Amino acid sequence: QVQLQESGPGLVKPSETLSLTCTVSGGSIRTYYWSWIRQPPGKGLEWIGFIYTSDSGDTSYSPSLKSRVTISVDTSKNQFSLKLSSVTVADTAVYYCARGVVSGGDSYDHWGQGIPVTVSS
Amino acid sequence: SSELTQDPDVSVALGQTVRITCQGDSLRRYYASWYQQKPGQAPVLVIYGSNTRPSGIPDRFSGSNSGNTASLTITGAQAEDEADYYCNSRDSSGNHLLFGGGTKLTVL
């Protein structure tokens, strides 16, 4: 059974860079695609971006966050990571990592439990 | 446009049928997937593709698509179905994904 687990600091100062890691267990990270999704308190889900772990290593980011986001993968550790620069209080959210599958359309079939991140001085 | 629009609140009587909709231009080209989220929990995939349920999802959940609208139908809603529901699909460019704003389902 594939499991995903987010890790990283729960508190980040404004203007700094938020860094999170998702560790995948129970399966290889070398197939599918891998995403970050966030949810501000009391609000809906927001797609941040994904990375394909095929040879291309293609990434795609939300247009609204593209200038500040980097998603990368470390296949040797079965991990992928999120970096979000120049954070503000608006980036306070629960951050989820998820596995993306393309089968008759896109879907996220496995999710991490989520990690709350607060941006505050 | 690159938006997916959902009704914010929907209610259904216990045991009755409810349809939750998701509208967007990109749905004319791409299927939506649907997620159930209960308070304090991660979302769970309930429908993907044209109308496929992952293992473990009750068969009272079904999906359909028509034009620019994707729908999630719960036939015989149960108390445990009370949750937030989100649709997800590609945007019109096909290069990004996005979520609908979510629908809070109340089972009366």
Image: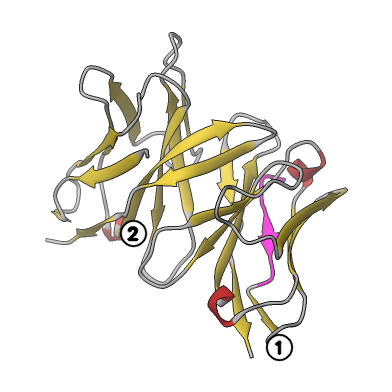
Report the magenta residues as a range: B1-7
Going by the numbered disc 1, the residue's amino acid type is Ala
- Foreground: A8 or B91? A8
Is any atom of residue B101 visible in this view? Answer: no
Residue linked to disc 1: B13
Counting from the top left corner in percent of width and height, residue B80 is at 54, 77
Going by the numbered disc 2, the residue's amino acid type is Ala
Counting from the top left corner in percent of width and height, residue B86 is at 58, 59
Residue ID at (59%, 57%): B57
Which secondary structure, mark 2?
helix
Real-space Cα separation, disc 1 to disc 2, in angstroms: 37 Å
Q: Quadrant of residue B9?
A: bottom right
- Foreground: A13 or A73? A73
Left or right: where B2 falls relative to A52: right
- Foreground: B77 or A40? B77
Determine the chain carrying the residue at label 1: B
On whether disc 1 and disc 2 are found on a single subunit, the reply is no
Look at the picture and state if B106 lies above or below B36: below
Nearer mark to the viewer, of 1 and 2:
1
Q: Quadrant of residue A75?
A: top left
The N terminus of chain A sits in image quarter = top left
Which circle marks residue B59 in the picture? none
Which circle marks residue A90 in the picture? 2
Left or right: where A15 falls relative to B57: left
Left or right: where A114 falls relative to B73: left
Look at the picture and state if A78 lies above or below A45: above
- Foreground: A19 or B20? B20
